[in-house]
Amino acid sequence: MQGTVECTRCHAHMESGWVPDNTHAGLQQENWSPGEPQPSFWTGLKVEKKDIVIPVTTFRCPNCGYLESYAIPQSQNGVLVSGTSSSQRQRTAVLIALGVMALMMALGVVFLIRVR
Ligand SMILES: [Zn+2]
Protein backbone atom coordinates (compact mmCIF):
# COMPACT_ATOMS: atom_id res chain seq x y z
CA MET A 1 0.00 0.00 0.00
CA GLN A 2 1.38 3.37 -1.06
CA GLY A 3 1.31 6.66 0.85
CA THR A 4 1.09 7.40 4.54
CA VAL A 5 -1.70 6.42 6.88
CA GLU A 6 -2.65 8.64 9.81
CA CYS A 7 -3.80 7.15 13.11
CA THR A 8 -7.54 7.80 13.55
CA ARG A 9 -7.06 8.08 17.34
CA CYS A 10 -4.01 10.33 17.84
CA HIS A 11 -3.21 11.44 14.24
CA ALA A 12 0.42 10.17 14.27
CA HIS A 13 1.91 8.62 11.11
CA MET A 14 1.43 4.83 11.20
CA GLU A 15 4.13 2.37 10.16
CA SER A 16 3.46 -0.43 7.65
CA GLY A 17 3.90 -4.06 8.66
CA TRP A 18 2.23 -7.45 8.69
CA VAL A 19 0.86 -9.94 11.21
CA PRO A 20 2.64 -13.31 11.05
CA ASP A 21 0.52 -16.49 10.99
CA ASN A 22 2.33 -19.38 12.69
CA THR A 23 1.67 -22.48 10.56
CA HIS A 24 3.19 -25.96 10.24
CA ALA A 25 5.13 -24.62 7.24
CA GLY A 26 6.58 -21.74 9.34
CA LEU A 27 5.59 -18.08 9.48
CA GLN A 28 3.22 -16.85 6.76
CA GLN A 29 1.63 -13.48 6.04
CA GLU A 30 -1.99 -13.21 7.17
CA ASN A 31 -4.48 -13.46 4.28
CA TRP A 32 -8.04 -12.22 3.77
CA SER A 33 -10.63 -14.52 2.20
CA PRO A 34 -14.31 -13.71 1.39
CA GLY A 35 -17.29 -15.36 3.09
CA GLU A 36 -17.60 -17.39 6.26
CA PRO A 37 -14.91 -19.88 7.36
CA GLN A 38 -15.96 -23.44 6.46
CA PRO A 39 -14.77 -26.35 8.63
CA SER A 40 -12.62 -28.99 6.97
CA PHE A 41 -11.79 -32.43 8.38
CA TRP A 42 -8.27 -32.41 6.88
CA THR A 43 -7.18 -28.78 7.16
CA GLY A 44 -9.23 -27.28 10.02
CA LEU A 45 -10.74 -24.58 7.78
CA LYS A 46 -11.07 -24.43 4.01
CA VAL A 47 -11.03 -21.49 1.58
CA GLU A 48 -14.22 -21.30 -0.52
CA LYS A 49 -12.94 -19.09 -3.36
CA LYS A 50 -9.27 -20.00 -3.69
CA ASP A 51 -8.65 -17.41 -6.42
CA ILE A 52 -9.67 -14.61 -4.04
CA VAL A 53 -7.05 -14.66 -1.28
CA ILE A 54 -5.45 -11.30 -0.48
CA PRO A 55 -2.42 -10.69 1.77
CA VAL A 56 -3.20 -8.38 4.72
CA THR A 57 -1.04 -5.31 5.40
CA THR A 58 -1.34 -3.96 8.94
CA PHE A 59 -0.38 -0.45 10.02
CA ARG A 60 0.70 0.25 13.60
CA CYS A 61 0.65 3.59 15.37
CA PRO A 62 4.00 4.06 17.16
CA ASN A 63 2.30 6.53 19.53
CA CYS A 64 -0.76 4.64 20.86
CA GLY A 65 -0.30 1.13 19.38
CA TYR A 66 -3.53 1.20 17.36
CA LEU A 67 -3.58 -1.38 14.52
CA GLU A 68 -5.35 -0.90 11.17
CA SER A 69 -5.42 -3.63 8.51
CA TYR A 70 -5.88 -3.44 4.72
CA ALA A 71 -6.41 -6.30 2.26
CA ILE A 72 -5.38 -4.77 -1.05
CA PRO A 73 -4.03 -6.97 -3.87
CA GLN A 74 -0.30 -6.23 -4.15
CA SER A 75 1.12 -5.57 -7.58
CA GLN A 76 4.66 -5.98 -8.83
CA ASN A 77 5.37 -4.42 -12.25
CA GLY A 78 1.64 -4.24 -12.95
CA VAL A 79 1.09 -7.96 -12.27
CA LEU A 80 -1.28 -8.82 -9.44
CA VAL A 81 0.24 -11.06 -6.80
CA SER A 82 -2.16 -13.06 -4.67
CA GLY A 83 -1.12 -14.92 -1.55
CA THR A 84 -1.25 -18.69 -1.36
CA SER A 85 -4.15 -19.92 0.71
CA SER A 86 -3.53 -21.98 3.82
CA SER A 87 -5.44 -24.89 2.25
CA GLN A 88 -3.01 -24.89 -0.70
CA ARG A 89 -0.05 -25.03 1.70
CA GLN A 90 -1.70 -27.77 3.74
CA ARG A 91 -2.51 -29.77 0.58
CA THR A 92 1.17 -29.53 -0.39
CA ALA A 93 2.19 -30.75 3.09
CA VAL A 94 -0.22 -33.71 2.82
CA LEU A 95 1.18 -34.60 -0.64
CA ILE A 96 4.75 -34.48 0.71
CA ALA A 97 3.76 -36.68 3.68
CA LEU A 98 2.09 -39.19 1.32
CA GLY A 99 5.23 -39.23 -0.85
CA VAL A 100 7.44 -39.89 2.19
CA MET A 101 5.10 -42.70 3.34
CA ALA A 102 5.18 -44.30 -0.16
CA LEU A 103 9.00 -44.11 -0.16
CA MET A 104 9.19 -45.71 3.31
CA MET A 105 6.85 -48.53 2.21
CA ALA A 106 8.96 -49.14 -0.91
CA LEU A 107 12.13 -49.26 1.21
CA GLY A 108 10.40 -51.69 3.60
CA VAL A 109 9.44 -54.00 0.71
CA VAL A 110 13.00 -53.88 -0.66
CA PHE A 111 14.36 -54.64 2.84
CA LEU A 112 11.97 -57.63 3.25
CA ILE A 113 12.92 -59.02 -0.18
CA ARG A 114 16.66 -58.74 0.56
CA VAL A 115 16.32 -60.42 4.01
CA ARG A 116 14.78 -63.59 2.48
ZN1 LIG B 1 -2.27 6.53 17.49
Image (cartoon, grey):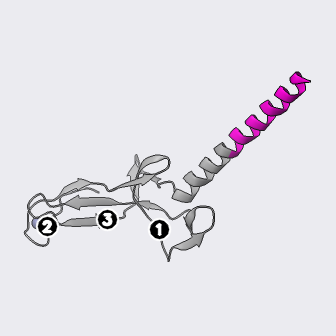
Question: Residue type at mark 3?
Answer: Tyr
The mark found on residue 21 in the picture is: none
- The answer for how far apart the CA atoms under marks 2 and 3 are is 14 Å
* Crowd rating for badge 3 (residues with CA inside 10 Å; few <14, some 14–19, many 20+): some
Q: Residue at x 14, y 67 (%)?
A: 7
The residue to which callout 1 is attached is 33
Q: Are marks 2 and 3 in contact (CB under 8 Å)?
A: no
Q: Secondary structure at mark 3?
A: strand
Question: Dividing the image into four equal quarters, which quarter contains ligand 1?
Answer: bottom left
The mark found on residue 7 in the picture is: 2
Q: Residue at x 51, y 73 (%)?
A: 37
The residue to which callout 3 is attached is 70
Q: Main secondary structure of the magenta part?
A: helix
State which quadrant residue 46 falls in: bottom right
Residue bounds of the magenta highlight: 98-116
* Crowd rating for badge 1 (residues with CA inside 10 Å; few <14, some 14–19, many 20+): some
Q: Does 84 sit left or right of 97 as displayed?
A: left
Q: Are marks 1 and 2 in contact (CB under 8 Å)?
A: no
| Rendered location of residue 114, percent (x, y) | 87, 22
Q: Secondary structure at mark 2?
A: loop
- The answer for how far apart the CA atoms under marks 3 and 1 are is 12 Å
Q: Secondary structure at mark 1?
A: loop
Question: Residue type at mark 2?
Answer: Cys
**51 or 80, which lies in front?**
51
State which quadrant residue 102 falls in: top right
**Does the Cβ of the disc 2 residue fall within 8 Å of ligand 1?**
yes
